[in-house]
Image (cartoon, rainbow, N blue to C red):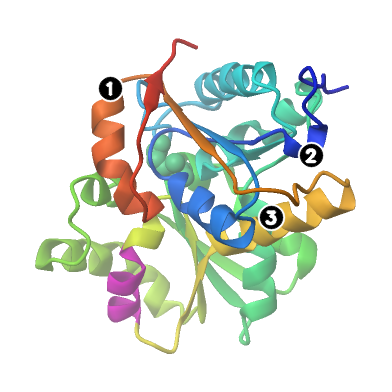
Amino acid sequence: MQEKQKNVPVNKAPIGIFDSGLGGLTVMSAITKLMPKENIIYFGDTAHVPYGSKSKKVVTNFALGISKFLVKNNVKFIVVACNTASAFSLDTLKKVIKVPIIGVITAGSVMAAISTKNDKVAVIGTEGTIKSNAYTKEIKKYNKKIQCFSQACPLFVPLVEEGWLDNKVTEQVIKIYLSNIISKKADTVILGCTHYPLLKNTIQKVVGKNINIIDSATAVAYEVNNLLKEKNLTNNKGKGSYSFYVSDSPEKFQKLGSKFFSKKIINVKKVEI
Ligand code: DGL
């Protein structure tokens, strides 16, 4: 069972959130908006980003190390705010880590399954997430009839990290990657990567306003909220405080992080995992 920190009631304990780098801050941002009283520890594995092109074994090792670090810091709940790590490692983490833990795949899949009218859903993500088929498997659990189309978009992460969110080059790259999906007439597109919410407006411009784009960050926040309530772990007092840890340069994370978190990020600490 989860150890209680001396004199700290478990409800006041932080939620642990981790990602390969900055992207998971979009999930953290949604969680802080919905649950402003929750304390949060965020870990960005900036020394090992990107996870999207790495093997399941390598990503799972990183994810285990980070989860153990979060447990040592007395988190009451862990959110794997990285699609690739959720797709590759969630099952292993659930077996090893003795704290409730969720990934980001289920929430987005449920939202898409509910939202599609023509039973055609497209998923875009990193090579790892798409290869794992995790979204398709999850969507089929809710509705076997739904046809899923998927497309890896490996250039999207570097474009976002570069801050190229809506220029002509980015628009062209989106057009090329999504042309196949558009031709399949899917009415719903899942942004199956933490970085993609920052491209949402440009993707919408390319696919047209009639296509519903699912950004799972908000859905994940609702899932966390429901689970905390169910487990009597909600913190109802005070204003949440946030700590940020990274495995490489805190300066870069601090500078770029505000784009993902929509708030200034300070006091980022580097730790070895
Ligand atoms: N966070 C990763 C994801 O959501 C994207 C960046 C990476 O490849 O590490 O899949």
Q: Which residue is mark 3?
A: 106
Describe residue 155's horizontal placement relative to residue 93 as left or right. Answer: left
Q: Which tag, 2 or 1, sits closer to the chain's start?
A: 2
Residue 183 covered by magenta stretch = no
Describe residue 65's horizontal placement relative to residue 272 as left or right. Answer: right
Decide if residue 127 is in sight here: no
Q: What amino acid type is highlighted by mark number 1?
A: Ser
- Label 3: how many residues lie within 10 Å, few (<14), some (14-19) or many (20+)? many
Circle on res. 249: 1
Q: Is residue 63 above or below residue 28?
A: above
Q: Is residue 7 above or below residue 176?
A: above
Q: What amino acid type is highlighted by mark number 2?
A: Asn
Circle on res. 11: 2
Q: What amino acid type is highlighted by mark number 3?
A: Thr
x and y percent of residue 84 in the render? 51, 39
Which of the two marks, 2 or 3, is nearer to us in this view? 2
x and y percent of residue 182 in the render? 38, 77
Q: Which tag, 2 or 3, sits closer to the chain's start?
A: 2
Badges 2 and 3: C-beta atoms under 8 Å apart? Answer: no
Q: Which tag, 3 or 1, sits closer to the chain's start?
A: 3
Q: Is residue 148 above or below residue 210?
A: above
x and y percent of residue 9 in the render? 81, 31
Circle on res. 17: none
Which residue is depicted at the point 66% across and 35% down? 14
Secondary structure mostly seen in magenta is: helix
**Residue stretch in magenta:** 199-207
Describe residue 222's horizontal placement relative to residue 256 as left or right. Answer: right
Which residue is depicted at the point 82% across and 44% down? 233
Which of the two marks, 2 or 1, is nearer to us in this view? 2
